[in-house]
């Protein structure tokens, strides 16, 4: 068959393609001469395969390439159609940049080139400071991502050889000891026998346990003034005493990262604050912009898709609602909401490989907000298909019936135009055929929308 011959020819030409000297061997014109068929016939067959086995570059004339062979020789094309060869290879340059960033724990964070750009610059200044680095304060509201940032700082330090592989990373949540500052201090610095009731022996603290690595102190404002003074001495000189000791010093080489939700000036001693020169502000979710919020949404849906081993078809309305809702618990609450949403719909549809998520599946609080807030009008956005293999930066709209109709219309109009050029029939006939193609598509869209309006949620 002609189609198989054309695809085989393109495959062979793609194997030989030299992009420093691109010829016209993979054009409809060239192939029409080789196979002695009309150009529009060749174009019709090839355009049907664009997005499947082929992709094309809209140069003049249009170039067609075998997607699989191209990927084996060069890189994976992410789109079915490119405006130019420059656009195609610019995509490759961008892909290489993203690959490098993926190997960098800080640069791979959502917002690394946006809302977190300044924060990451500050953190790198801290990490690369000699010896035990500069201590860092991470300041932001609950759920903004301070704990995750601390872990990324550790991974970045290991990645760049500042800390050795396997170096300890220890977390102490000071809020757990809010009602017992004595116990908090003993856990952090250690204690000696008789330091307090129940201290029957000597015990090392987390500072010593973190020697050679990193200690993350979350909710550090829970430290009382005495503990702040002791930590100040350690930050300043690298020495400390266990609880109950009055002489002698212990040493440890520990990089310190601290986090708090509270105002610094009101909760810390001036001397302590002066010893922590870098304060990194972690913005709230709503301050991070629509695109970053959507990346978080995609990432969390992908995580659940992997856990549940299901594909999720998420309506554009659900995405708009999640992106527009002000989550008081920030990124953490958004993640929990998506986890709950996926879990509840999975429980109802365990037998299905693809699970649809619609507005009616959202928590009542978000649905009520949509109904009451005129500023959150429901938009007819495109749905997104989330699979376990999806990536946040490349999550794209699924092929809805509407998008399929549009693509078919484009292909039909393109075919009509090529016939008009090659056969030279009258202009009024060309216009009439285009009019009929558009009218047919509109009829199908109107019918589709009338069906969807019955089950919008």
Image: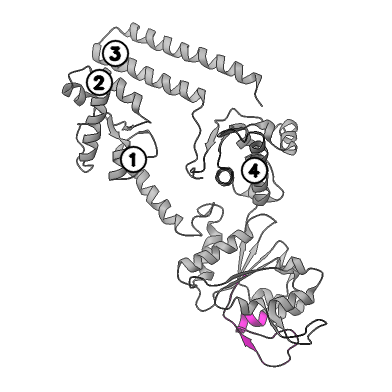
Residue under numbered circle 2: 1
Residue at the spot of label 1? 88
Give the image's coloring scheme: one colour
Percent coordinates x, y for residue 387 in the rendering: 52, 40
Q: Nearer the viewer, residue 370 or 289?
A: 370
Q: Nearer the viewer, mark 4 or mark 3?
A: 4
- Position of 444 relative to 119 (above/below): above
Kindly identify the residue that appears in the image at 33 percent across and 45 percent down.
75
Q: For label 3, count other residues whose C-alpha is less than 10 Å away and answer few (under 14), some (14-19) or many (20+).
A: some
* Disc nearer the start of the sequence (1/2): 2
Residue hosting label 4: 338
Image disc number at residue 420: 3
SS at circle 4: helix
Q: Is residue 153 above or below residue 430?
A: below
**Residue 117 horizontal side relative to residue 345, left or right:** left
Q: Earlier in the sequence, mark 4 or mark 3?
A: 4
Classify 10 Å Cα crowding around label 1: few (below 14), some (14-19), many (20 and above): some
User: Counting residues from the N terminus, which is met first, the one under dot 4 or under dot 2?
Assistant: 2
**Mark 2: few/some/many CA within 10 Å (<14, 14-19, 20+):** few
Residue 431 at x, y percent in the picture: 37, 10
């Amino acid at each position: 068959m002609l189609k198989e011959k054309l695809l085989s020819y393109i495959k062979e030409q793609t194997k030989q393609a030299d992009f420093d000297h691109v010829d016209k061997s993979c054009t409809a014109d060239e192939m029409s001469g080789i196979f002695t068929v009309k150009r529009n016939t060749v174009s019709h067959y090839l355009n049907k395969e664009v997005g499947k086995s082929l992709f094309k570059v809209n140069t003049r004339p249009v170039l067609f390439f075998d997607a699989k062979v191209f990927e084996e020789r060069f890189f994976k094309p992410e789109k079915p159609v490119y405006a130019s060869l420059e656009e195609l290879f610019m995509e490759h340059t961008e892909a290489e940049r993203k690959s490098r960033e993926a190997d960098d724990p800080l640069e791979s964070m959502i917002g690394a080139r946006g809302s977190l750009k300044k924060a990451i610059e500050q953190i790198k200044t801290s990490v690369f400071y000699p010896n035990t680095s500069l201590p860092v304060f991470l300041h932001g509201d609950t759920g903004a991502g301070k704990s995750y940032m601390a872990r990324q700082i550790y991974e970045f330090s290991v990645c760049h050889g500042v800390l050795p592989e396997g170096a300890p990373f220890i977390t102490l949540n000071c809020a757990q000891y809010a009602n017992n500052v004595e116990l908090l201090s003993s856990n952090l610095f250690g204690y000696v026998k008789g330091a307090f009731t129940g201290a029957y022996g000597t015990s090392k603290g987390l500072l010593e346990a973190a020697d050679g690595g990193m200690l993350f102190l979350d909710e550090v404002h829970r430290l009382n003034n005495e503990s702040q003074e002791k930590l100040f001495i350690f930050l300043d000189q690298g020495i400390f005493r266990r609880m109950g000791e009055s002489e002698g010093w212990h040493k440890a080489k520990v990089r310190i990262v601290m986090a708090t939700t509270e105002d610094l000036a009101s909760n810390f001693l001036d001397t302590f604050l002066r010893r922590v020169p870098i304060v990194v502000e972690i913005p709230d979710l709503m301050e991070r912009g629509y695109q970053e919020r959507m990346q978080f949404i995609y990432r969390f849906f992908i995580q659940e898709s992997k856990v549940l081993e299901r594909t999720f078809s998420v309506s554009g309305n659900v995405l708009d609602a999640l992106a527009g809702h002000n989550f008081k618990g920030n990124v953490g609450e958004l993640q929990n909401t998506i986890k709950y949403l996926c879990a509840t719909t999975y429980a109802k549809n365990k037998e299905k490989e693809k699970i649809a998520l619609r507005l009616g599946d959202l928590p009542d609080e978000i649905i009520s907000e949509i109904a009451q807030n005129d500023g959150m009008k429901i938009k007819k956005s495109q749905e997104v298909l989330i699979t376990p293999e999806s990536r946040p930066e490349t999550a794209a709209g699924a092929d809805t019936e509407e998008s399929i109709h549009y693509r078919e219309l484009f292909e039909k109009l393109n075919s009509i135009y090529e016939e008009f050029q090659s056969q030279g029939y009258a202009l009024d006939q060309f216009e009439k055929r285009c009019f009929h193609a558009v009218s047919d598509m509109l009829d199908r869209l109107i019918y589709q929308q009338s069906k969807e309006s019955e089950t919008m949620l």
